[in-house]
């Protein structure tokens, strides 16, 4: 009976879902230095569980009420934590191993490159 319990426990651990995570790091090349970090799960319907916006080294509290990722495109809307104001909007297309595009911050568009992390 003891061996059967150990075997069933081992099988349950093997059969459990992986809960893998992934993410992106996006950065501008010029001033202001904008860095966006996103982390999400790889399961169906998973949302962003981590998002950060840093501008010239200063962390800004954000939420991400809208985002889209597929093999060709990454789109993210970052708002303040109350979702009253858009702080940054990223639109980038896959170009090889990276996603290149733009981030609109304070009404100005800046070139941005995003890498999977």
Image (cartoon, rainbow, N blue to C red):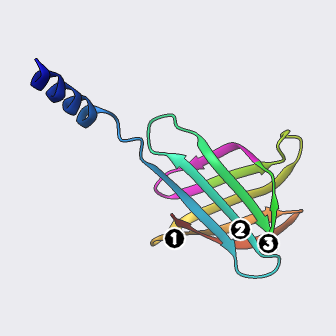
Residue name at image x 51 percent, y 70 percent: 98
Query: On screen, 72 above or below 28?
Result: above
Q: Are marks 3 and 2 in contact (CB under 8 Å)?
A: no
Q: Is residue 77 magenta-colored?
A: no
Secondary structure beneath dot 1 equals strand
SS assignment at label 3: loop
Q: Are marks 1 and 2 in contact (CB under 8 Å)?
A: no
- Circle 3 sits on which residue? 57
* Magenta residues, start to end: 63-74
* Residue that mark 2 sits on: 35
Q: Which of pointers 1 and 2 lies earlier in the amino acid sequence? A: 2
Assess whether residue 65 is covered by the magenta stretch: yes
Image quadrant assignment for residue 89: bottom right
Task: Give the residue displayed 69% in from the left and 62% down from the top.
Answer: 36
Q: Secondary structure at mark 2?
A: strand
Label 3 and label 2: CA atoms lie apart by 8 Å
Report the predominant secondary structure element of the magenta stretch: strand
Residue at 34% from the left image edge and 35% from the top image edge: 17
Write down the residue under mark 1.
Answer: 98
Q: Which of these two is toward me, 8 or 57? A: 8
Whole-Å distance between the Cαs marked 1 and 3?
23 Å
Asked if 110 appears above or below 65 in the picture, the reply is below
């Amino acid at each position: 009976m003891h061996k059967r319990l150990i075997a069933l426990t081992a099988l349950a651990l093997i059969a459990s879902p992986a809960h893998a995570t992934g993410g992106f790091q996006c950065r501008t090349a010029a001033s202001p230095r904008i860095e966006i970090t996103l982390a999400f799960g790889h399961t169906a319907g998973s949302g962003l569980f981590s998002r950060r916006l840093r501008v010239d080294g200063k962390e800004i509290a954000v939420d991400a009420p809208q985002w889209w990722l597929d093999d060709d495109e990454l789109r993210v809307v970052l708002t303040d934590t109350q979702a009253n104001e858009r702080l940054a909007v990223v639109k980038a297309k896959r170009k090889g191993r990276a996603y290149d595009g733009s981030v609109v911050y304070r009404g100005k568009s800046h070139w941005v490159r995003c890498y999977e992390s």
